[in-house]
Image (cartoon, rainbow, N blue to C red):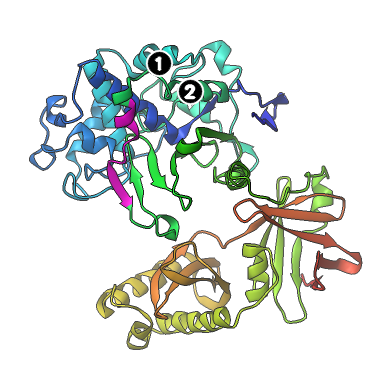
Amino acid sequence: MQSVHGLADRGTKRRWHVDTIFDVGSCTKQFTAAAIVALECDGKLRTSDPIAKYFAEVPADKASITIHHLLTHTAGLQSEFGGDYDVISRDALVATTLAAPLLSAPGAKHAYSNVGYSLLAAIVEIAAGKDIDRFLRERLFRPAGMTSSGYQLSDTERSRIARGYRDGEDAQLLERADSTKGQMWNLIGNGGVYSTLTDLHRWLLALQSDAVLPDAGRKKLFHPHALVTSSYAGSGLPLYYAYGWYVGPQPSGKTLIWHLGGNGTINTALRFHRDDRAWLIYASNVSEFHDPRYPIPAVERMLGREHIEIPSEVGSITRDQLARFAGTYCSATNRALTLTVRRNFLQVTGEGQEAFAFTTEGKWQSSADFDALNARTAQAVDSSRMARVDVLAKSFGSWITPDELAASEAAFWKKRHDRFGEYIGTRVLGTMKPQSRRYIGRTIVAIDFHRGTAWREYFWTQDGLIGDVGPITSPPAAQFFPVSANCLMTFDPAEARSAKLCLGSDGRLEIAGSDVVLRRSR
């Protein structure tokens, strides 16, 4: 089943189609990995080869790195050394990577590394004696029946590309790639391949036959080689990295093989439910859907024959009509929702536990446990600001020493004062249940200064201690889309639930299905 919606190019009004071409992002890694496995099957290399066999003057600390280490992100390399579209040659990228210090000893642990896959692309070129684009097309794509995939696009193919839109503006991704004249080795191997939904479907079918790799090669490609985490997203289930793919058991006992790809604008997801022989392929060209998981949980629930709520069809209203909703609305208990216009939807943030719960869970509700964590977080922020580390340390576990805590908190405040000026006050937005089972709450605070606001998140453990803390760029928010002239709705596909706001008379904002009414405050 295929479903395609929206525009591939807003300027020409060209619609998305199954043969629209788009950048698959980090899903490119599976092609690079398959190229390596194909070369091994062809007798051109071995995954056990040290990289010193292909690169000259490899430093002693990297001499034991093998191709297998690069494939599984266990080489100990850093993730990247520059932007995707920085101009850098293959040899310069290799030299920069080999000169940089390692994060860990080769083989010690998994650490996702884009440059590791760029080194793999360089090895493909050296072992194959041809550039990576030509090798992928000849050895993998054509045998799979893929006609519109690769790094370089013809003029005809360029006319079918999906433009990428970041916050409503054309991100000019194709033009930025063109400006490098192919010398964008920060990206090659780990991203940057163009494809279509049709071609990706053909690729996934090919991986179920001997079309591109023999059975032994396919088993090696999908084998769970390296442990990523023993409890993925707090599920209590392990996640492994294969060659260019993640592999992990599901609560049902079945195996899911998957990878995501994206650059904050164009996004892709490939998910193979191996036991059910079901593939999900997703692509988007707008930053609003920056998380490729957005539509997938609901689809996977349907594959599992679960009943899900079907979201309402999005209506069409003008930006001026949408702007009628914009503003901050307060309840009688001073809980506030702020609605901000974003292209064709409203971004909704909440302040105060009930309002915060509405934006994160779709329900206007409080919790005595969360209220207590909110109060404790406010105290922690105050102790930090006043440099009362002896008091603050009592709220932290043994994962950080008092001296480390003092240095970390002092650095936080100095950086914010330098950027934003004098402190004004702290607002605890609320607490939500985090994904990880390790924590019982994730509390978000807004710290206001004269020239701006900084946000921090505090994670609370089962023992009632702060288990982690860090800055975030923006508070959690929900996206509400118009479903009528006066009502907007958000839908959470992971939980298969929705929430609805309606604009009433006299500036009232009503939460559908409840007696909650908020009034515009400013």
Q: Which residues are magenta?
A: 218-228
In the rendered structure, find residue 371 and report the number of the disc placed on it.
none
The residue under the point 16% across, 37% down is 65
Q: Which residue is mark 1?
A: 211
Looking at numbered disc 1 in the image, what kind of residue is underneath it?
Ala
The residue under the point 80% across, 70% down is 514
Quadrant that contains the C terminus: bottom right
- Badge 1 marks a residue whose secondary structure is loop
Residues 23 and 369: in front is 369
Task: Give the image quarter of residue 26.
Answer: top left
The answer to whether marks 2 and 1 mark residues whose Cβ atoms lie closer than 8 Å is yes
The residue under the point 34% across, 15% down is 135
What is the x, y in percent for residue 9? 66, 27
- C-alpha distance separating marks 2 and 1: 9 Å
What is the x, y in percent for residue 474? 55, 60
Q: Which residue is mark 2?
A: 205
Q: Residue 144 in magenta?
A: no
Residue 188 vertical position relative to residue 239 in the rendered view, above or below: above
Residues 151 and 241: in front is 241
Asked if residue 153 can be seen in this view, the reply is yes
Locate residue 513 relative to residue 107 in the image: left or right.
Answer: right
